[in-house]
Amino acid sequence: QKEVEQDPGPLSVPEGAIVSLNCTYSNSAFQYFMWYRQYSRKGPELLMYTYSSGNKEDGRFTAQVDKSSKYISLFIRDSQPSDSATYLCAMSITGGGADGLTFGKGTHLIIQP
Amino acid sequence: GAVVSQHPSWVICKSGTSVKIECRSLDFQATTMFWYRQFPKQSLMLMATSNEGSKATYEQGVEKDKFLINHASLTLSTLTVTSAHPEDSSFYICSASRRGGEQYFGPGTRLTVT
């Protein structure tokens, strides 16, 4: 079993829809959870950074963490064609930028105009 | 702020040669830099962690004599792939973090070994 599981997709939705992206993980020591967006042949761009369980909202993006279920989600409201990209979940045991991150495979998202 | 650059963005080299990739934090001092590798349709895999002035810490299965990492200053880390072979062809991405902060990623370097 991989440490972080993420459905690679592709996930195709119409413009304006609410998108739900998810990851599950097995290591209960993970405490810091991130979502990155990656365009083809580019480096990942940090979207959301959360600690422990709970919700965090930033504009059209909402990140949820449920540590009891080892399940994290990213919701995108009012999705736009420019949101089409690969979304990577990542996590670490310690924060503060001291630890390397463990990534999921990424979900390829397509927003249809 | 928090911009990380990599150079070159794309490199082709012949089997048996060495290639150096640079990673720079442009507008902050990075206490720690990380090197990842990403094969097509795969996740980023951590290769090594480096702190300025210290030896790098390599992940299990990564050959430290093949992937030489030098973290010479708080804004520069280099990865040298020695005696490259076709199976080393991949997308190499660095990230940098400042104390207490998130990791910021560079744009990546695509290495093709012929």
Image (cartoon, coloured by chain):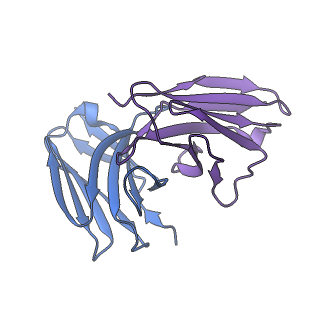
Q: Is residue A6 visible?
A: no
Left or right of A90, for residue B64: right
Q: Is residue B84 above or below residue B54?
A: above
A18 or B80: nearer the eye?
B80
Most distant residue in the bottom direction: A68
Q: Position of residue B62 (x, y in %)?
A: 70, 53
Q: Give the residue drawn at x 56%, y 51%.
A: B46
Q: Residue at x 63, y 57 (%)?
A: B59
Q: Position of residue B58 (x, y in %)?
A: 65, 54
- Front in this rendered view, residue A9 or B91: B91
Residue B66 visible? The answer is yes
> Relative to A41, does residue A77 appear above or below in the rendering?
below
Q: Which chain is painted in purple?
A: B
Q: Is residue B27 left or right of residue A83?
A: right
**Where the N terminus of chain B falls, by quadrant?**
top left
Residue A80 is situated, as x and y percent measured from the top left of the image, at 20, 34
- The part of the image, by quadrant, that contains residue A56 is bottom left
The image shows residue B39 at horizontal and vertical percentages of 60, 45
Chain A, which colour? blue
Residue in the picture at 19% in, 40% down: A79
Q: Residue furthest right?
A: B16
Left or right of B66 in this view: B58: left
Residue B100 horizontal side relative to residue B34, left or right = left
Q: Quadrant of residue B69?
A: top right
Count the marks: 0
Q: Which quarter of the rendered picture does the C terminus of chain B lie within? A: top right
Q: Residue at x 46, y 37 (%)?
A: B30
